[in-house]
Amino acid sequence: MKFLKKFLLWFTVVFATIIALLYIFQVDYLIKAVRTIYFNGHTTAFLKDYTEFDNRTIPKSHHPQPWATAKDYNSVKPTQELENWHQKTGTVAFLIIKNDSVWSESYYEDYDQNSKSNSFSMAKSIVSASLGKAIIQGKIKSLDQKVADFFPEFSKGTSARMTVGDLSSMSSGLDWDESYYSPFSITTRAYFDEDLNKVILGLKGVDQPGKAYKYLSGNTQLLAMCIEKATGKSLADYVAENFWEPMGAENEALWQTDHKDGIVKAYCCFASNARDFARFGKLYKQHGKWNGQQLLDSAFIAKSTQPRFAQSPEYGYGWWLSDYKDKNIFYMRGHLGQYVIVIPQDDLIIVRLGNHHQHHDKTNPHSEDFFVWIDQSYAMLAQRK
């Protein structure tokens, strides 16, 4: 009994000391990280982690627009190679949408067509779309409007020249460590900190903005904050009003916030389902038009889906780009292999959601599984009668 009491006393002292040190060194966000991620058996964010955080709700459309179903829906079975990759990478949803009709649809684990899944960085494309909308509405002057117009914190030094377009095209020149697995990176802090505004407004410019591409999640978060300042609305409400409602989303979505009623984690964490994620791919494939209504300027979309920098052809404004097999491809991409892949010339949208992805070598900006999803989709389509 004495030993147990001593042990409990020792454990309490050590535990209290650790907690105190976390606060002293200003890494107390790790407490939330341990509770929400590590205690759930994960080493990084995961598909269903939105249940562990506060969220803003984006209601489903008052006028839902279900996807059309192809006459030969699911008539071709997934190739064995595709099934092997689904098993290897933990796919939970895979859709092939041909000619704006769902042609093939597969779900795994406990997921179905209404199941929510974390978008991770696919949300960056949604934020970029919101920028385009704010420009159409005159809330933001253009891609060249200075960030300092919204946040004077960036009115000095190199950041004084930083524009909202620089944020969208990943060329801000800001100091940021894009590390998803280090518990001490600013990306990890941003994911768990309960004052995301303070984290972002504390960023410093270290390179000239608008000169070169460097992927930084902090860019998108700051862009979202500019959009909120310009529109006077929370980004979740803005997306609900200008996209989710007119595009006829069939399910509500959730967007993680830094705390209850706080700001959304705009660079990630938009929880939705495969069919509704695909609507953004269709919107961009249709040059911003939806059922006869021009939701986004076609010129903005054309610019967004072309490289800004010749030396970085893999990225435009909020969208990833590829010319695989001589096809002009643009796509949304998120951590662990979330994809909405758009191939306009073949009127094709491929959606893949899952638990893991397969890295390519560091010289290739596109993951290996990205090419697999495309190749195997075409292999299936080739079997159509």
Image (spheres, grey):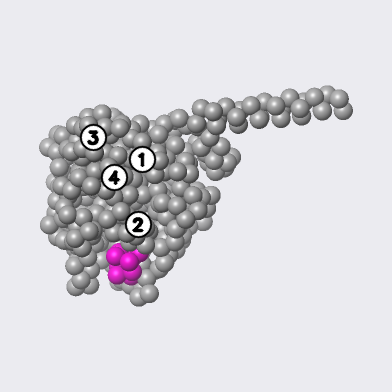
Residue at 47%, 41% in the rendered image: 193
Report how far apart the C-alphas of labels 4 and 1 lie in the structure: 11 Å
Q: Over which residues does the magenta segment extend? A: 240-248
Task: Quickly name the residue at label 3.
Answer: 156
**Residue 245 is a magenta residue:** yes
Instruction: Tell me if mark 3 has few (under 14), some (14-19) or many (20+) residues whose alpha carbon lies within 10 angstroms of its own.
Output: few
Residue at 21%, 55% in the rendered image: 140
Task: Quickly name the residue at label 1.
Answer: 200
Quarter of the image where the C terminus is located? bottom left
Q: Which mark is residue 235?
A: 2
Task: Quickly name the residue at label 4.
Answer: 151
Q: Picture quarter containing residue 348?
A: bottom left
| Mark 2, secondary structure of its residue | helix
Which tag, 1 or 3, sits closer to the chain's start? 3
Which tag, 2 or 1, sits closer to the chain's start? 1
Report how far apart the C-alphas of labels 2 and 1 lie in the structure: 16 Å
| Mark 3, secondary structure of its residue | loop
Residue at 19%, 67% in the rendered image: 294
Do we see residue 12 in this rendering?
Answer: yes
Q: Position of residue 352 (x, y in %)?
A: 36, 52
Q: Amino acid at mark 2?
A: Leu
Q: Position of residue 3 (x, y in %)?
A: 83, 24
Asked whether 161 or 98 is in front, the reply is 161
Q: Amino acid at mark 3?
A: Lys
Instruction: Tell me if mark 2 has few (under 14), some (14-19) or many (20+) residues whose alpha carbon lies within 10 angstroms of its own.
Output: many
Q: Is residue 313 left or right of residue 332?
A: left
